[in-house]
Amino acid sequence: MHLDPLLPPLVGVIAVVLALGLLLQFFRQPQLVGYILAGIVIGPSGLGIVQDVALIELLGALGVTLLLFFIGMEVSPYHLARGWRIAVFGTLFQVIISVLTVWSIGSYLDWSLSRIVLLGFVISLSSTAVVLKLLKDSNELDTEAGQNVLLILLAQDLAIVPMLIIVSLLSGQTPEQSLIYKQIIGGIVITAFAVWVVSRKQFKLPFAKLLKKDHEVQLFAALLVCFGFAFITGILGLSAALGAFVAGLVIAAAKETNWVQHALEPLKIVFVALLFVSMGMLIDIQFIQSNMALLLMLLLGVLVTNTFINAVILKLLGNSWRSSVYSGALLSQVGEFSFVLATVGLQVGLINQFGYQATIALIALSLLASPAWIQGAKKLLSLYEAKETR
């Protein structure tokens, strides 16, 4: 009897994810922690059930796209328009202060300017997937902190483009002018289209009435809208997740969110889980064990620094201290797009193999520690408020 070679690792992955999910549910911990731990267990440095990290990463990238699509269906265009100052200045100041922080360390270690800028960019980017999932699970997306964080995360998704250009220039490589122009024009066009859609009082999808009659057709129509917009922004040299977010705005403007959510919710759960599993698979247990003290020191430094920087920036932009500190904690981890920057930095010689491994380990550990850090910040703020009201 022939056994499909895909079945053993598939069963192993599902079993580990399920077991860890139930265990963390018992301890009232977020499911995404279980996904990351499952990635560690099944990955190359764990049991080795799955060796092809690239395939899991590819499937996980679809999870980010679907997550941003769902967020686009739920956000308020009014809040997005009103909070542009937070998106622009919050992200800009975060990047500048992060680079200056790394420079204060790198100057003592005799790092080059290019390495300082690269690592500053790396720690300035937060995890869109982790933060938005936590906000959705806790029903906090519509709060002041949730809206502020969403705006900054979207701006960071846009900022990855100029960051990659700057890193290429610092390494001595000149990006093609045609690509830069395409990205600038693409950013303007996609922003203008999003504004036009959400500003219309009535907006209807083509064949919307026909779609409501067939669930199978609904599924493929929803996938086409989501990944079609992601494909367009990808062609324009922008983030595919940004295109999915705009697609979500289109669906919301057309008042078609019910059947779209019903059609794609199961797929979103699976692919978002694969995203976090792929992050866990990147963690090299032996490397972490050999450099535990250094990585823990860096992890604590990043969490504290990012929380403080974002809290101060948001407070200066007019938010309450509680909202600012909580938002800072939400943005404290290092995000999945930092993997891209680290890989580019290794390819162009701005960091060596040890620096790359340390950066990857730091990103993964910050994602793993982020839910506990955020919950701790929330409890401390609640205790402080309770003490103040006595």
Image (cartoon, grey):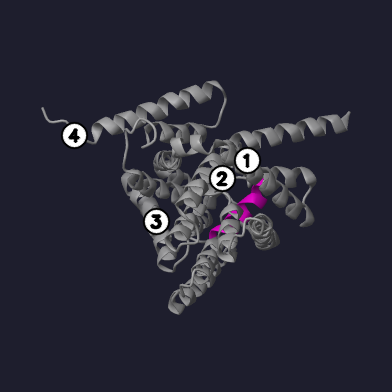
Q: Which mark is residue 227?
A: 3
Q: Which residues are magenta?
A: 146-157
Label 2: how many Cα within 10 Å (few below 14, some 14–19, many 20+) = many
Label 2 vs label 1, nearer the camera: 1
Label 3 vs label 1, nearer the camera: 1
- N-terminal of the pair, mark 4 or mark 2, is 4
Determine the secondary structure under disc 3.
Answer: helix
Q: Which mark is residue 132?
A: 2
Depth check, front residue: 129 or 81: 129
Q: Residue at x 56, y 28 (%)?
A: 29
Q: CA distance from mark 2 to mark 3?
A: 19 Å
Label 4 vs label 3, nearer the camera: 4
Label 4 vs label 1, nearer the camera: 1
**Residue farthest bottom in this picture:** 177
- N-terminal of the pair, mark 2 or mark 1, is 2
Label 3: how many Cα within 10 Å (few below 14, some 14–19, many 20+) = many
Q: Which mark is residue 4?
A: 4
Q: CA distance from mark 4 to mark 1?
A: 45 Å
Total labels: the figure holds 4
Q: CA distance from mark 3 to mark 1?
A: 40 Å
Mark 1, residue position: 297
Depth check, front residue: 213 or 87: 87
Residue 301's x, y, as percent?
A: 66, 44
Depth check, front residue: 240 or 76: 240
Q: Is residue 288 above or below residue 239?
A: above
Label 1: how many Cα within 10 Å (few below 14, some 14–19, many 20+) = few
User: Residue 37 colored magenta?
Assistant: no
- N-terminal of the pair, mark 4 or mark 1, is 4
Q: In the rendered image, which quarter contains the N terminus?
A: top left
The kind of residue tagged 4 is Asp
